[in-house]
Amino acid sequence: MTITTEINKVSLKKIEGKNLSNRSKEQLASCDIRLQKVVNLTLDFMDLVVIDGHREKKEQDEYFKSGKSRLEWPKSKHNVMPSLAIDMAPVRNLIIPWEEVTLFYYFAGAVISCAKQIGVKLRWGGDWKGLHDFKKNEFNDLTHFEIRD
């Protein structure tokens, strides 16, 4: 399946000069242009990997059954096209440092800051209610960012 979005016309040339894998580019291409712009700006400051953009029913069902998502198909913002949600993570030495949880909080701060710079409102899976009280977050999905309208 070929996904044609604005990234192929506008942003891809800028992204090609940055460290983003082909798989990450493919996942990013399935996302809303606002998320593409946030990723593009974030790449000026940090290396990252895009884990998921759009999810088809089978993938969403697997994520729900395994506990990686609390939403069944088609209730997730990953389930629309283009995707209004993205899962991405910081990269250090070409790997995702899952054990460095603090790095994910810094990463989220960078992503949200970049989004604000270009007028994009995001909700982060480490602070679902936007209270900045991370200890009260009921479901930590530290790689998840979604458009908040």
Image (cartoon, grey):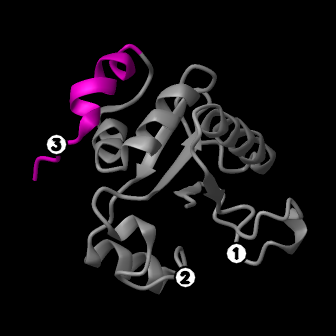
Indicate yes or no whether the magenta region holds residue 114: no
Q: Nearer the viewer, residue 37 or 144?
A: 37
Relative image position of residue 85 (x, y in whole percent): 46, 58
Q: Residue at x 57, y 19 (%)?
A: 44
Q: CA distance from mark 1 to mark 2?
A: 9 Å
Relative image position of residue 76 (x, y in whole percent): 44, 74
The quadrant where residue 106 appears = top right
| Residue at the disc numbered 2 | 70
Mark sitting on residue 139: 1
Q: Residue at x 71, y 46 (%)?
A: 104
The quadrant where residue 80 appears = bottom left
Q: Earlier in the sequence, mark 1 or mark 2?
A: 2
**Callout 2: 10 Å neighbours few (<14), some, many (20+)?**
few
Magenta highlight range? 1-17
| Residue at the disc numbered 3 | 4
Please state which amino acid type lies under the numbered disc 2: Arg
Relative image position of residue 30 (x, y in whole percent): 29, 50
By secondary structure, the bulk of the magenta-drawn segment is best described as helix
Relative image position of residue 136 (x, y in whole percent): 87, 74
Q: CA distance from mark 2 to mark 3?
A: 29 Å
Element on which disc 2 rests: loop
